[in-house]
Image (cartoon, grey):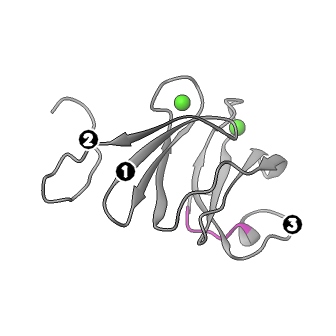
Amino acid sequence: MNDASVVLANAVPGTVDTSWTVKVVGDFNGDGSSDLFGQRTDGATSIWFMNGTQRLASGWPPAVGVGWEVQVAADVDADGKSDLLWRHTDGSTRVWLMDGLSVRLNVALQSVDPRGRWWARCGAP
Ligand SMILES: [Ca+2]
Ligand SMILES: [Ca+2]
């Protein structure tokens, strides 16, 4: 499960439309087990809550517009549940603070580079 580009149909048992791709892995319900976040090219999203290789449950967080792609899952607010960092093809970025399938807060990030390039900063500037 380390390859985030694996198509869901090849990653876990069961039949899944091949238009879905696992984008990131995170613990979205805070149970200590990694879950799978999938995105479809039309903007639909899905989370599979896992226990090892067994899918316990699944559901659909809000869809995103075309051009948005999730970049990473990380617990940015330290509540024990993974959150999502998004990037649009126009360079804008957003963070979704997640609570299971729900988006608790949807925040736009400001660019750190006036030339429109984007990167994540960690630690002291
Ligand atoms: Ca989990
Ligand atoms: Ca969090």
Query: Is mark 3 in CB contact (under 8 Å) with mark 2?
Result: no
Identify which amino acid the numbered label 1 is placed on.
Thr
Identify which amino acid the numbered label 3 is placed on.
Gly
Numbered disc in front, either 1 or 2: 1
Residue 100, position as x, y percentages in the image: 69, 36
Residue 79, position as x, y percentages in the image: 55, 23
The residue beneath circle 2 is 121
Query: Is mark 1 in CB contact (under 8 Å) with mark 2?
Result: no
> What residue span does the magenta drawing correspond to?
4-8
Q: Quadrant of ligand 1?
A: top right
Numbered disc in front, either 3 or 1: 1
Of the pair 114 and 50, the residue shown nearer to us: 114
Residue drawn at x 55%, y 61% is 4
The secondary structure that most of the magenta stretch takes on is loop
Q: Is residue 123 magenta?
A: no
Residue drawn at x 72%, y 76% is 18
In this view, 81 is above or below 64: above
Q: Residues within 10 Å of mark 2 (few under 14, many from 20)?
A: few
Q: Secondary structure at mark 2?
A: loop
Residue drawn at x 75%, y 44% is 49
Identify which amino acid the numbered label 2 is placed on.
Arg
From the Cβ of disc 2, is ligand 2 less than 8 Å away? Answer: no
The residue beneath circle 1 is 93
In this view, 75 is above or below 73: above
Real-space Cα separation, disc 3 to disc 1, in angstroms: 33 Å
Residue drawn at x 80%, y 70% is 16
Q: Is residue 59 left or right of residue 6?
A: right
Q: Secondary structure at mark 1?
A: strand
Q: Residue furthest top?
A: 79
As drawn, the label of residue 14 is: 3
In this view, 30 is above or below 13: above
Q: Is residue 13 left or right of residue 95?
A: right
